[in-house]
Structures are given as C-alpha cells and as structure tokens.
Image (cartoon, helix red, strand yellow):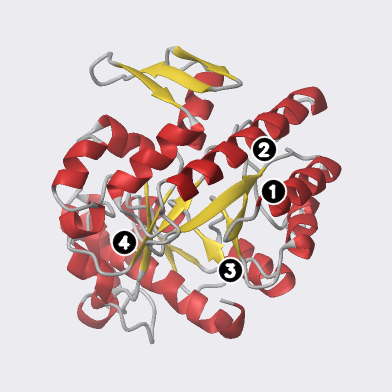
Amino acid sequence: MPDATRGAVRALTTAQLKATGTDHIVVNTLHLLLSPGPERVAELGGIKKLMNYEGTALSDSGGYQVFSLLHSKKWQGKITKFGAVFKSPKDGRKHELTPEKSIEVQMMLDTDVMVVLDDCRDSNVSKKEAEIAVEWTLDWADKAKRHFLKLGLDKKGKLLSCVVQGARFPELREFCMKELIKIGFDGYNYGGVGGYVVDNKGELALPEMKVIAEMVPKGKFLYAMGVGRPQDIEFANREMGWNVFDTVIPTRNARHGTLYCATEPDGILRITRSRFAKDLLPIEKGCDCEACVNYSRAYIHHLLRNGEMTGMTLATIHNLRFYQRLMTSLGGNS
C-alpha cells in the first residue's frame, strides 16, 4: 500500500495511481485529523469519495506519528497511560488522542480497514520501556476493540487490526501477540521502528517478526508496517507469510531519482546520474507503466535534473508499478 498521507499519493492523480495497478492505499489519521479535520471529511462523503478512489483504504491509528514526534520532543505534548495530548504545529490547537478517539476519527474518514492505537516506541528502547509500551498497547487495543463494536463498525463490514509491540525482545512480542489474539482482530501488525527485515547477507535481521508470523490465527492478515525495500517484502512474504505492506520508499525515492529496475545489477537505477543524459532506453525494458512505454531515461533524467514535477510524476508511476508487479509475482502468498 503506498502512503496516500492526506488523501493523495504525492505527484499523482487518482487515475494515475489506479493505472499502476494499485488497489490498496493507506491514509494518515493524524494528518487528516489536523487538516481538513475528520468532520469535514465525513461531511464530504469520506476520504475515498473525496479522492474518487474505488480501492481499499486503510487508515493508521495516528499513534506512530504522534508518539514518535512526542518521544523525540519535536512536538509539545505528553503521553500517559490514557493516550496522548499534543498541540497542533499548524495552529497551536490542543488535541487528545485516545484509543476511542482514534476509532472515531477513522470512522469519520470511512476507511475499510482501521488500526487500533498503540504505544509506538523505538525498537532500541530498554526492556523496561518496552514492557510499558506492551502494557499500554494491550490496554488500548482492548478499549479500541470495544469502542469499534459499540459503534457497530463490524456490522458495516469494516476490519480492525492491532499492533504487536515489544521492541527487539522476541519474548515480549510473543506475550503481546498472545494477549492480542485473546481480544481478537482481523489483522496483526508488526509495530515499532524495526529497521530492515534482512541484512546484507540476506539473513533475517528481525527475529521477532518470525515469532509473530508463527502465531497468527488462520484467516487473519499480517501487516508489516513501514516495511518497504523490495528484498524485505519478498523475504517477509515468502519466508514468513507477511502479506500486507506499506511504505513511502518507492514514492519518496522516485522524487529523488532512485528508480527500481530488475535489469540493473543491484536492482536500482539512479536516473539523475550523468550517464543517463543521452540514454534512449526506457527505465526498465519490459515494464508496462506509462513512463516506460512512452518516455526514455534521457527525458526523465532531464526533467528531474531540472526539478520538473512531470519527472517526479513519471518516476513515481514507474516505482509503484514495479512494486505492484513484485506483489503479483509473489502470487498465492499475497
């Protein structure tokens, strides 16, 4: 799922997004809470109607963004066992994000899949801090699930997923997963800033992901939040069964000239390098995206070197199409 943070994948129209084969997106609860506000989105028919999008939309809880910003002291606010209180950097207004509030905001966004609020801390925290994060995450997950059912969202066909915390401690991840299974969710998400799934030797770098995958109930989805390098997605899916991913990597890298290309030795083509200035080949031979079918590396090189938005659009189209072709190649596990 590419990140359509504020209801758009940057530099693309919804029609261009659809043409890449993308039929799942993730929108950002926190950013839409701050602007234009969930009430406005609801008044306009929900985020999918607003952006004229017919696929599946998942909304995060807002937890990762709020807590990472508060833990790092970039925003004014505090985190307690009840949730988070913070000031908007846009207008200074005070906001409170609780497990129940997060569900209510996502209900107004009218997304298809919702995520419960969790206490998201860096994976390198101490074990004591990780234990507190697990305790609060479990409490909030229970409250969010109860509120989800109270609002009748399950009867409207909405899905609810939870976030498994525990930092780099497999035993804490296992405990958290067991308790979340008791509450019961449609999906189980890997949470926290975990780094790369595989190391430079192609070996598993995050053993806690395997612990979670081995415990997932039958028929539930596994969502690796923020996992986005092609090699990480392929390994997590084929070796452990993770089947939902979101990342800013393909779109952010595209805008900076880093394109994915199966014909390159390392799978990456850095299009702004001078050697592509006269290259009339497509970004990737055999790719059926708009950029590869119609334009040369030389043209996209020229556009990006001169800061033209069209270059960013074409590069983004290619990277998203590359990722969707990757997911199709994973086939049955996806």
- Residues marked 2 and 1 touching at CB (< 8 Å): yes
The residue under the point 52% across, 38% down is 117
Residue carrying label 4: 316
Place residue 138 in its image quadrant. Answer: top right
Q: Amino acid at mark 1?
A: Leu
* Position of 101 relative to 183 (above/below): above
Distance Cα–Cα, label 3 vs label 4: 22 Å
Q: Is residue 249 left or right of residue 178?
A: left
Specify few, some or many for label 4: CA neighbours under 10 Å numbering under 14, 14-19, or 20 or more: many
Q: x, y (%) of residue 183?
A: 67, 49
Q: Outermost residue, left direction?
A: 44
Specify few, some or many for label 1: CA neighbours under 10 Å numbering under 14, 14-19, or 20 or more: many
Tell which tag, 2 or 4, sits nearer the viewer. 2
Residue carrying label 2: 138
Residue carrying label 1: 180
First in sequence, mark 4 or 1: give its number: 1
Residue carrying label 3: 243
Q: Amino acid at mark 4?
A: Thr
Q: Amino acid at mark 3?
A: Asn
Q: Outermost residue, right direction?
A: 171
First in sequence, mark 2 or 3: give its number: 2
Place residue 237 in its image quadrant. Answer: bottom right
- Residues marked 1 and 3 touching at CB (< 8 Å): no
Q: Amino acid at mark 2?
A: Leu
The residue under the point 45% across, 51% down is 114
